[in-house]
Amino acid sequence: MNMIETPDSNVLQGCMNIVDQLIQRASQTQRGFADIRKAAQEVVATHAPPDSLSIAAALFSTETHQARMLATFIFGEYAGTDESALHFLHMIVSRDPDWHVQEGLAKAFDRYCATVGYQQAVPVIELWLADEYPTVRRAVTEGLRVWTSRPYFCDQPLVAVRLLAQLRDDESEYVRTSVGNALRDISKHHPDLVTSVLKEWDCSDPRIAYIHKLVNRVTRKTQG
């Protein structure tokens, strides 16, 4: 696997104009990410993959969180076809301290799944769900929302619920909240299915009870 490194000074100099323009454009976004995602798609459409990835690496090395989010979207566009891009998301982007970038990681992971196919992505989904970093686990639980609106999972909602249920006692409240919200999404259309799985849980564990409470509010309302 070819690793993507932060560009050296020569590479940075070669793409400085486009990088500076992208940083300026991205920094104008204060809410949402629609234009940042559009900018990423434009980079991919107008540059060869190696150049796009070099631009992304340069963007990610900046202090501007919007630029790092833009870089994350670019890596997401290539993650399904380039292992180094997926690796960068997994091992580098997930360590970024800015929550905006982590939202971008969730979207980028969903883009990866869409590219390779959601069923085909299940092994990587499982790998990320088992990762030691909560940002990696949350990228999956949050990125695929609404899970049952995605191909494969729309026909296999139990698979989605079982995958999410693996994190019912996750040590991170950040992750558990995402799991609860994702299950709550599913329960709006599959209340009986979600309820049947929740009944298997040991709610004497406060971490499990936390998610159960989040989801149960909706399942009761749906069934009522």
Image (cartoon, rainbow, N blue to C red):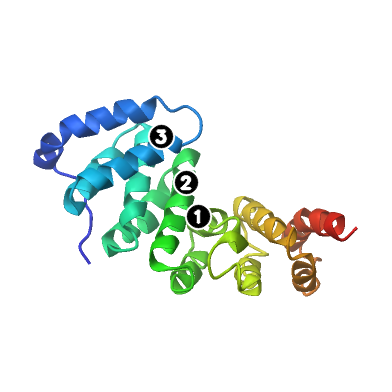
The circle drawn on residue 139 is 1
| Viewer can see residue 56 | no
Residue located 60% across and 70% down the image: 163
Q: Please count the marks in the image.
A: 3
Measure how far apart labels 3 and 1 are at the Cα level.
21 Å
> Does residue 222 lie above or below 152 as drawn?
above
To which quarter of the image does residue 17 belong?
top left
Q: Is residue 156 shown left or right of residue 90?
A: right
Residues tagged 3 and 1 counted as in contact (Cβ below 8 A) = no
Give neighbour class at mark 2: few <14, some 14-19, many 20+ (Cα, 10 Å). Answer: many
Marks 1 & 2, CB-CB < 8 Å contact? yes
- Mark 1 / mark 2, whichever is N-terminal: 2
Q: Quarter-wise, where is residue 171 in the image?
A: bottom right
At label 3, counting other C-alpha atoms closer than 10 Å, the crowd grade (few under 14, some 14-19, many 20 or more) is some
Q: SS class of the residue under badge 2?
A: helix
Q: Quadrant of the C terminus?
A: bottom right
Identify residue type, mark 3.
Asp
Relative height, residue 152 to residue 107 (above, below):
below
The earlier-in-sequence mark between 2 and 3 is 3
The residue pinned by badge 2 equals 102
| Residue that mark 3 sits on | 35
Verify CB contact (< 8 Å) between mark 2 and mark 3: no
